[in-house]
Amino acid sequence: MPPDKIDGVTNTKSGKARYFYGWNIVAATFLADLSYAEHYTSILGFFFKPLQNEFGWKRSAIAAVQTIARVTEALVAPVVGPLIDRYGPRVLMPIGGIVVGLAMLAVTQVDAIWQFYLLRGVIVALGFAFMGRMVTDVAINNWFVQKRGRALAIGRLGGNISSIIFIPISVFVIAASGWRTMFVIFAVVTFLVVLVPSAVLMRRRPEDMGLHPDGESKAPNLHLTNDTDLTEATAAPEPVWNRREVLTTKSFWLLVLCFGIDNMALQGLNISLAPYIQDLGYGDTTLAAVTTFRAIIMAALLPLMGFVAEHTHRVPVRVAPFIIQGVGSFLFLLAGQPVFLWLAVALYGMGGSALGVITEVIWANYFGRLSLGLVRSLGYLIAFGFGAFGPVAMSAVFDLMGTYRPAFGVLTGVFLAAAVVIGIVRPPTARRYATATEMSPSRRSGS
């Protein structure tokens, strides 16, 4: 008897899918992440000197645009999160792609700092809230459980490849044609890799298509404890949360504190890395090589980190990325010597590669799939609030003291403090449980 076909997925007699549609979600995420380079604070650092030279803006004033962007994303997140749970990325991402692309084109016309803040800080951030990592990570977490870490890693690989591609391109284009040309390139890339792929490929949850996470023939157990290995799951209802329940959960606040202070450190370090390297006397060629090297390290390690992230029930897996980044931050204090510069960048990239995936796996494992958009949006609101102060704080240290060195010392301590917090946090117990089918929009609207 020929195999059945359900929504483009071919199933064998045993019920195991030969090809699982969830990998289309990963592919759409990978493509969308190719547009993410402009959103990285490390890329924004390349625009510091040309903007200073043209407009006379201070570094702290330029860095403030990233603070505005983070605050905007944080404030919008609680609105977007429930929309992800209800409508999914297929509805939200094309809207975000259009907004981001048009706003980046408009940035090329600015001649005042307030215009830069409005377009790059507010409107671009609004668009990213609808098409960015919060949306795509929730989508992948909905489609995968046992293979959650590796799926997230592959999807996020697009962002790392984006950095590898656009770091040298940004350095060359800004030097040869000016910073405005680079924003046009960012806009065109956003239109190409977000609009059509997300509209065609993205779906909300596998249950909406008659499937189950990971392509399994029956639903996995998503009621996880801190000692649960994802490979040992069995069928069970999933946790359901409302806003009040999330905000009164101790584990939520410990995770937010941990990821929030880490986000603050990362945002501050990312935006200051390029000017710091230049201030040490290294040329544009070394700057491009070092930052590209970091992106290559992150991309090369990401698939491995995806597998490692599937074991976040083990404390060392959760703690190690923070310690690695703390050591990397300390070595930046010695970066006047090339060997320490390259070593610091390597460790910083290694820790960042692991943490990006582990963070999302922890949120999904601790709170489940069905309310993940809501949970992540509340986490974004607070964690991004922390992160918003990183760029301005780092740049303010430079403006006041003429060096970033004191800030790097503080960052070392911040990363180590986050390592302690993540080591003690435990998964919460939900008050309510339901199946994904019971939480579908059609079932809820009909009830």
Image (cartoon, rainbow, N blue to C red):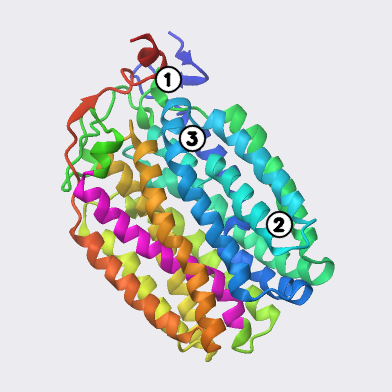
Label 2 sits on what residue type?
Gln
Residue highlighted by disc 1: 208
Task: Provide residue 271's location: percent of width, then percent of height.
Answer: 55, 69
Residue highlighted by disc 3: 23
Label 3 sits on what residue type?
Trp
Check the image and report above or below for 13 versus 306. Answer: above
Q: Residue at x 28, y 59 (%)?
A: 318
Among the two numbered marks 2 and 1 on one chain, the one whose residue lies closer to the N terminus: 2
Which residue is situated farthest in the right direction here?
A: 177
Q: Residue at x 77, y 58 (%)?
A: 110
- Which residue is nearer to you in this view: 383 or 56? 56
Provide the residue span drawn in magenta.
248-277
Marks 2/3: CA–CA distance: 40 Å
Q: Tag on residue 64?
A: none
- Is 318 left, or right, of 394 in this rendering? left
Q: Main secondary structure of the magenta part?
A: helix
Answer whether residue 250 is magenta in the image.
yes
User: Mark 2 Cα within 10 Å, few/some/many (few <14, many 20+)?
Assistant: some
